[in-house]
Image: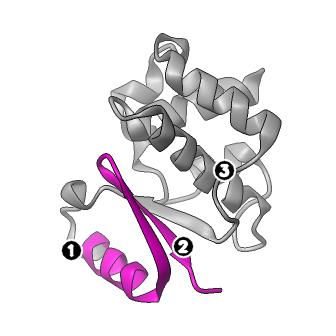
Amino acid sequence: KQDVMLFTKIINAETHGESFRSKLYAGSVILNRLKSSKYPNTLHDVIYDKDQFHGINSRLFRFDPTEDMDSYKAAVYLLKNGSVLDSNYLFFANPKAITRPKSKIWFTKMLKASSSIIKLDNHWYIQTKS
């Protein structure tokens, strides 16, 4: 139950106002990181990993996550069924929200290293080559 609420909160904070599919994709990136040896091995630690998900600083992260039923449904579905994206989709970003120079450099680097990009709603979901 605690994982469902935490997962719902980050999905809501990252994709508030976006489609159900976008919520599934953002949650899938988080689950893919959970299964990757490059990231921490608990959902909590993946979500709170330094400088990874800026949604944790959003006011949306602090509110009751069940107010956004699509985020809740996406979290429950993903925890039960697993990622809907290939396992090497490990990044997503909202290009319009990238304002810091360091973040712009990171985003450009990720685009160059990507093998595929899915553009959906405000986010780009980035598949890495390896």
Quarter holding the N terminus is top right
Mark 1: few/some/many CA within 10 Å (<14, 14-19, 20+): few
Q: Is residue 84 left or right of residue 58?
A: right
In percent of width and height, residue 36 lies at: 75, 68
Q: Amino acid at mark 2?
A: Gln
In percent of width and height, residue 21 lies at: 49, 40
Q: Earlier in the sequence, mark 2 or mark 1?
A: 1
Quarter holding the C terminus is bottom right
Q: Earlier in the sequence, mark 3 or mark 1?
A: 3
As measured in the structure, the alpha-carbon distance from the residue carrying label 2 to the one carrying label 3 is: 13 Å
The total of numbered circles placed on residues is 3
Residue ID for mark 3: 84
| Image: magenta residue range | 103-130
Looking at the picture, tell me which residue is in the foreground, 92 or 77.
77
Residue ID for mark 2: 127
Q: Residue at x 32, y 29 (%)?
A: 17
Looking at the picture, tell me which residue is in the foreground, 5 or 91.
91
Residue ID for mark 1: 101
Q: Residue at x 52, y 48 (%)?
A: 26
Q: Amino acid at mark 1?
A: Pro
